[in-house]
Amino acid sequence: MAQRNYYQILGITRDASDKEIKRAYRELARRYHPDLNPGDEEAENRFKEINEAYEVLSDPDKRSRYDQMGPFWQRSSGGNGFNWTRWSSTPSNTDHRNRNWHMPYEEANGSGGIFSDFLGTLFGDTSSRARNDSRARKKPIHGSDLEVDINITLEEAYEGTIRKITSSETGRDFNAQIPRGARSGTKVRFAAQGKRGFAGGERGDLYVIIHVEPHHLFERNGDDLHMDLRLDLYTAVLGGDVRIPTLGGDVMLRIRSGTQSGQLIRLSQKGMPRLHNTSEYGDLYVRPLIQVPTELNERELDLFKQLRNLRS
C-alpha cells in the first residue's frame, strides 16, 4: 500500500485543490466506512488506503515531498534524496550495525540485522511499525446523518406538537418538538441522534422531515389558508353576518349585499403562524359559493318573476 499512487486512491488529479481533496476523501470514506460494510475486509483495507492518502495529500509539506519523491517521500532528507549516513561503512568498535555489515547474508538478513534494517528503511516496514502507523493514521470521522418522515395534521402544524421517536442507533426514545407553522418538507434537526462516528468521531444528526396531511376544509398556500363558504342567495343579495370556522376558533364574517359567487373575502391574520416568527400569521381567504334555492312553490316563483320584471 505504501507504493500506491495516492492521487489514484482518491480518484483526483495531481493538480487537485485542497477543497477537491477533502470532498473526494469524505465521499470515499463514507462509502467504505467499516460501520457501513461490516465484515467486508476489502472495504476495510480500502478505507485504510483512503485515510493514508488523505493524511499525505491534505498536508502541504507532506504533499510536496510526495510529489518530489513518490513512494520514498518519507525517506527524503532535506529534499536531497535518501539519507545514507546511518549506513556508512566506517569501522567502529562500538557500532554493532557496522559489525553486522561483515556478517554472512543469512545472519545479517535475520531479525535485527543490518540488511533487514536497510531494506525496511528503504522500502517500508510491513511489521509492527506499519501497524502502529496505520493506527496513528486513523482520524475521527463524523457519523452519518439519519432522516425520518412523520405525518401531522394541519391543526398540529398550527398549534405545534410533540412526536415520540425511537432512535434506531441508540434504541432510546426521545420527544421531537414540532414547531408551530411547520410546512410539508420542513426539516427539524436533532443533534447527535444519528449514526455513531468512527475512531472517536461525533455522532451524526437526525432530521425529522414533516409532511402535513390534507385538510377537509382548508387548503394551504404558504402561510395563507383558503376555504369555500356555501352562502345562501338571500344573504348574498341582502348582506348579513355569517359564522365561519378558523383554526384559531370561529369568527363572524360580515357579508356585504350584492356579494358575488367566487369573490374572495380576506380575513387578515387568520391563516397559519409563520414558522420563524409565530407571533405573525398568514391570511384566510374565503370564497363564497352562492346556493340557488330549489323546489320553489308557486308563490315563491311568482315573486322571483316580479323581481325579474322590476330589474328589467
Image (tube, rainbow, N blue to C red):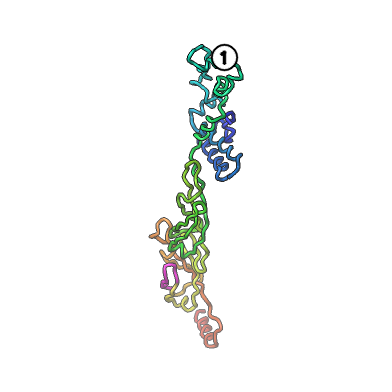
Most extreme residue toward the left, as rendered?
279
Which amino acid, by three-letter code, is at mark 1? His
Residue depicted at 51% across the width and 29% down the height: 63
Image spot of residue 286 (x, y percent)? 47, 68
Does 101 appear in magenta?
Answer: no
Q: Is residue 2 visible?
A: yes
Image spot of residue 136 (x, y percent)? 49, 34
Q: Quadrant of the N terminus?
A: top right
**Residue 252 vs residue 148: left or right?**
left
In the picture of the structure, the residue carrying the numbered disc 1 is: 102
The residue stretch that appears in magenta: 245-255
**Is 231 placed above or below 127 here?**
below
Most extreme residue toward the bottom, as rendered?
299
Secondary structure of the residue carrying tag 1 is loop
Image spot of residue 167 (x, y percent)? 50, 54
Count of numbered badges drawn on the protein: 1
Does 246 appear in magenta?
Answer: yes
How packed mark 1 is, by other alpha carbons closer than 10 Å (few <14, some 14-19, many 20 or more), is: few
**Residue 224 vs residue 115: left or right?**
left
Residue depicted at 56% across the width and 27% down the height: 125
**Is 39 placed above or below 161 here?**
above
Nearest to the observer: residue 83 or residue 231:
83
Nearest to the observer: residue 108 or residue 252:
108
Nearest to the observer: residue 153 or residue 224:
153
Task: Identify the image quadrant of residue 107.
Answer: top right
Q: Is residue 70 visible?
A: no
Image spot of residue 17 (x, y percent)? 52, 34
**Residue 5 vs residue 258: left or right?**
right
Task: Identify the image quadrant of residue 131.
Answer: top right
**Is 63 placed above or below 198 here?**
above
